[in-house]
């Protein structure tokens, strides 16, 4: 099977450093391991480093079965900005030009968002009679509207109205939709008033567990020991991620102040980083190590009692289960979160974590106190988390099912 994958805003197999595998890498690996020929289309602009990979349209051979095609675009500095929208429009335009003359695939797997490139690829391939699986992971353009102040949201919806049209056209142009949960899939189908069919599939946002070399893990442990005393009896709550507007860190700051005998490790960076660090500057029990590597994160998980996910109550989050939850399950660490919707129900039904409310602000503080006092229950939830992950969310299961699904669609149409 020859397959095109389009995914933008994700790490690529050719990027340097320790990478967190996302959809592009995970699906490419799963397909090439089965002997399928993959053409991975992506942006030359790296969403995470905010740098261009090559500065031009490029074709890179990576192994026997993988070809990576990078499409040039201007780039941007802020996640939510008009410059990002311009970048995506330019990416779509250049993608449209670069697709001409390239051997047509048997099937395509197109990431959504961004909207414009997804619209361009699904539209062209539909005209060529190529089946397309659309991978819907975020509720764009609603997410774009969310970035505006409340008083300007009606005006923002008016300005962004063309994107809502492109969204519906993109959803109609595809043969089937992939989404991280059933609720998210139902939302996508509701946008075009279509019922679920055999072409649609739920594909959780799990990742391949990378084996860390012993020397890398030892080095990571030594790095942590130079900053913290890992092997202590202290209760440790950790956060690993981007300090952005998707999270409410106020309950964490309150809990850290209320429990000076607990240790809080908040790893990462982002727009809110300086503000949160400044609020905690007088607290000796809060540590900000900055961005950490995969091996450093793995060591931190092993020496943490819980993983914090202080997510805001946002509609698209409530429809999905974030990759942080799968990371926690895979490492057997209970997740403590304020999430609502699908993820909250999943945690409650499987007893793999703990829930608190963003308001009152003391809710997280009380929750952590209860966890510390009930160590046996915490160990039980840790064990349950690993069991649920092994049964439902391993890379082999999730991406094995997806590869088989794509092969079946390719043969049917």
Image (cartoon, grey):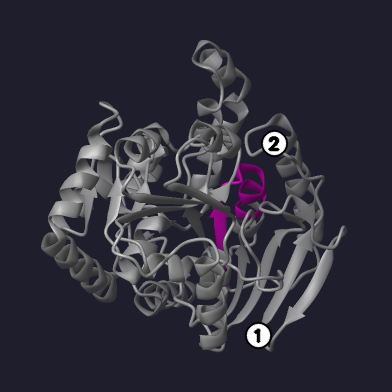
Disc 2 or 1, which lies upstream in sequence?
1
Say which element carries label 2: helix
Q: Where residue 321 appears, x then y in whole percent?
A: 35, 52
When the figure is inspected, residue 361 is found, relative to residue 88, above or below; the finding is above
147 up-or-down from 65: above or below: above
Q: Is residue 301 magenta?
A: no
Q: Is residue 207 above or below residue 239?
A: below
The span shown in magenta is 107-122
Q: Quadrant of the N terminus?
A: bottom right
Relative to residue 378, is residue 157 drawn left or right? right
Task: Say which residue label 1 marks.
Answer: 65
- Labelled disc at residue 85: 2
- Image point 37% across, 51% down: which residue? 263
Q: Is residue 121 magenta?
A: yes
| Residue 248, image x, y percentages | 42, 34
Seen at 60% across and 66% down, the residue is 5
Closer to us: 395 or 51: 51
Residue 26 seen from this side? no
Whether residue 387 is visible, yes or no, is yes
Q: Bin the neighbour count of mark 2 within 10 Å (Cα to Cα): few under 14, some 14-19, many 20 and up.
A: some
User: Where is residue 356 shown, x and y percent of the image?
Assistant: 24, 39
Can you give x and y, in whole percent of width and height, for residue 279 in the image? 50, 31
Secondary structure of residue under mark 1: loop
How many discs appear?
2
Q: Is residue 30 left or right of residue 62?
A: left
């Amino acid at each position: 099977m020859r397959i095109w994958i389009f995914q933008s805003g994700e790490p690529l197999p050719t990027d340097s450093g320790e990478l967190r595998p996302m959809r592009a890498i995970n699906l490419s690996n799963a397909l090439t391991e089965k002997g399928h020929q993959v053409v991975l289309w992506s942006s030359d602009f790296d969403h995470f480093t905010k740098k261009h990979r090559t500065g031009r349209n490029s074709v890179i051979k990576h192994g026997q079965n993988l070809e990576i095609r990078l499409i040039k675009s201007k780039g941007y500095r802020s996640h939510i900005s008009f410059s990002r929208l311009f970048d995506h429009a330019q990416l779509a335009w250049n993608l449209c030009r670069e697709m001409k003359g390239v051997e047509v695939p048997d099937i395509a797997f197109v990431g959504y968002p961004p909207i414009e490139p997804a619209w361009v690829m699904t539209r062209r391939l539909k005209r060529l009679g190529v089946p397309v699986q659309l991978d819907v992971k975020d509720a764009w353009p609603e997410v774009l509207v969310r970035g505006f102040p409340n008083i300007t949201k009606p005006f923002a919806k008016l300005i962004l109205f063309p994107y809502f049209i492109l969204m519906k056209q993109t959803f109609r142009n595809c043969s089937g939709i992939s989404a991280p949960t059933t609720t998210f899939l139902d939302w996508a189908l509701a946008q075009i008033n279509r019922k679920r069919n055999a072409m649609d599939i739920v594909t959780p946002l799990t990742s391949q567990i990378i084996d860390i070399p012993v020397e890398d893990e030892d080095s990571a442990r030594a790095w942590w020991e130079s900053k913290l005393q890992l092997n202590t009896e202290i209760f440790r709550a950790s956060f690993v991620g981007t300090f952005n507007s998707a999270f409410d860190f106020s309950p964490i700051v309150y809990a850290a102040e209320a429990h000076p005998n607990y240790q809080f490790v908040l790893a990462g960076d982002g727009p809110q980083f300086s503000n949160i660090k400044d609020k905690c500057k007088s607290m000796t029990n809060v540590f900000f190590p900055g961005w950490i590597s995969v091996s450093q994160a793995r060591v931190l998980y092993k020496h943490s009692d819980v993983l914090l996910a202080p997510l805001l109550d946002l509609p698209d989050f409530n429809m999905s289960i974030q990759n942080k939850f799968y990371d926690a399950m895979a490492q057997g660490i209970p997740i403590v979160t304020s999430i609502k919707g699908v993820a909250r129900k999943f945690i409650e039904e499987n007893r793999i974590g703990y829930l608190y409310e963003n308001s009152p602000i003391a809710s997280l503080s009380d929750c952590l106190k209860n966890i510390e006092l009930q160590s046996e229950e915490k160990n039980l939830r840790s064990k349950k988390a690993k069991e649920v992950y092994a049964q439902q969310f391993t890379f082999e299961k999730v991406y094995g099912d997806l590869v088989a699904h794509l092969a079946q669609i390719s043969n049917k149409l």
